[in-house]
Amino acid sequence: MKLIISVLLFVCITICGSFINLVNSQQAHVSCQYSHTLQDDAILLPDSSGYSMIHDFFGNTKVNGFTTIESIYDYKNSDTTCDNKVDGSSYWVPSLKINEYQYRPTMIKVYYQGHNNTFYPNNPMPKGLQLIAGSPKNTKEDWNIWYLCKGRGFSRTPFTDCDKNNETQITQYNFNLIFPNCWDGVNIRPNFTYRNAAYDYSGDNEKGRCPEAYPVRIPQLNMQLAYFIRESNWTNAQLSLNPIINSGGSRTFPWANLFSAHADFFNGWPEQTMKFMIEECLNKGVTCGNDLPRIYTFIKNSYAMINCKKSSQTVAQIDSTGLNVPYVKIVIPAEAKTEIWSEVVLDLWAANNDPNAKPNFFFGYLVTPEEFASDSPVCPNKSSDVQLYIDGQWGYHSINVTQLVINTMKNNQNEIHLCFTADGPSTYSMQTANTDHPPRLLFKHPGAEVNENVQEAILYRPPTDPLMTSTTSDPLTSTTGFNSCSTHLPSILLSFIMITITFMFLL
């Protein structure tokens, strides 16, 4: 079975290009540009700076060694390098060095995946959940860590050479890191001796079942970490490790081979977004891509006028005769006044009645509250207020209603009423509020496009000694860190103890 998976991975990645979904189609994803580099680790060395291995960060631009759950959810005072600004999470990996040069990664693409969800449904991640994939102690192959040389496919063993593209003279080298997806239900973060999450069972009949000690199934992060650099010889490629404190107080900065690849995740997704990801994407077997809202609501009031009579049919017809006209009432949620968003869409589960039809428009028109409430409403004959471009495939199709929502809120109102008609011979169907796919209103915040930028070599210089700044007497004796003893030891000695323990235990 594992050999078959390896072959399929190789063939698929060679054909599909830079990034692919390695597990299934039930997923959401986010892409993030490289953000910054620090010698910090808010998970294993919290409340301190300069004592960790060198890490390259993605996503939340404010994350450092002092980041807390409270601060990572402070969206108004932070930003992100991700293509969905709703994601306040941080992702980080050890820095890469080849010979005497460091190389920054270009980007990551993180898939949030589920499988066998009918039998083992996913649960939302709690606020601030922290996870680790891989281990700096690894010295051999790991089924959850893969390596890619663009054009040669995946391998469980690191490539020592990776040819440049003939046209660009750039090498693309990826690490694929798969995170555990079964949480213990208690501990928000791991420490040096305890993992708070494990992997589900991989057997054909058990895929998705979690171990008893880790009973809470959560989305599985599948991280694609990409380097675009001008170096093809990876023989001496190494990844950063935690520094060693020598007896005289000086520090040594070790590096390890690429088997030590690992990654950290600090959850900063809004709770509503995480709920949407689970209930509307993964557990329904729907691919949502990066189209995840900050807040959302379902339309609870709709009806159709059929031959001039009101009807509560589950599927409403739309045509140009005026005899089949659906109506919906949109209620803007109160959170829209305080949350950060830049775009609002109305999603209709709809399709052209001809499954082979090419995309075409039907139209929406504003009606007054009184018209909506009347027994014989009339859909206006005027220029449309919104349009939906739709083909013959059933699914959620989006109407941009951003300006309608803004105008409504400016008028201190919270309701929008719409009717829908077609123009021409095509007819359409849409599901109403009384179905499994009701109309829904999504408040989104798209980010900038993530690019495959080339990262130039940087001459490596060992870090200088850290300047200790901490909200406790010593970050390594904090009760939120690894050592919760009340006895205060000199920070250098504690650092030595901490790093020694790092090499004694697997992460």
Image: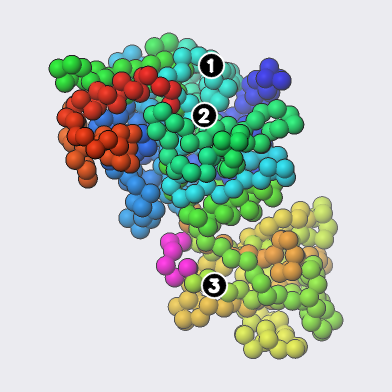
Badge 2 is on which residue? Answer: 177
What's the distance in space between the residues labelled 3 and 1, CA to CA?
51 Å
Residue designated by label 1: 141
Q: In this picture, is 140 found above or below 468? A: above
Query: Front-most of 238 and 318?
Result: 238
Q: Residue at x 70, y 39 (%)?
A: 116
* Total labels drawn: 3
Say if mark 2 contacts mark 1, CB within 8 Å. Answer: no
Q: Quadrant location of the N terminus? A: top right
Q: Which residue ends up furthest to the left in the rendered image?
A: 248
Q: Tell me residue 367's x, y (percent).
A: 64, 82
Q: CA distance from mark 2 to mark 3?
A: 40 Å
Q: What segment carries the magenta color?
A: 335-341
In terms of image quadrants, where is residue 67? top left
Residue 30 is left or right of residue 193, and the answer is: right
* Label at residue 491: none
N-terminal-most mark, 2 or 1: 1
- Residue sitting at x 76%, y 59%: 351
How would you rate the neighbour count of disc 1 (Cα within 10 Å): few for under 14, some for 14-19, many for 20 or more? Answer: some
* Quadrant in which residue 436 is drawn: bottom right
Is 203 situated above or below 323?
A: above
Q: Marks 1 and 3: in contact by CB < 8 Å?
A: no
- The residue closer to the viewer here, 301 or 386, is 301
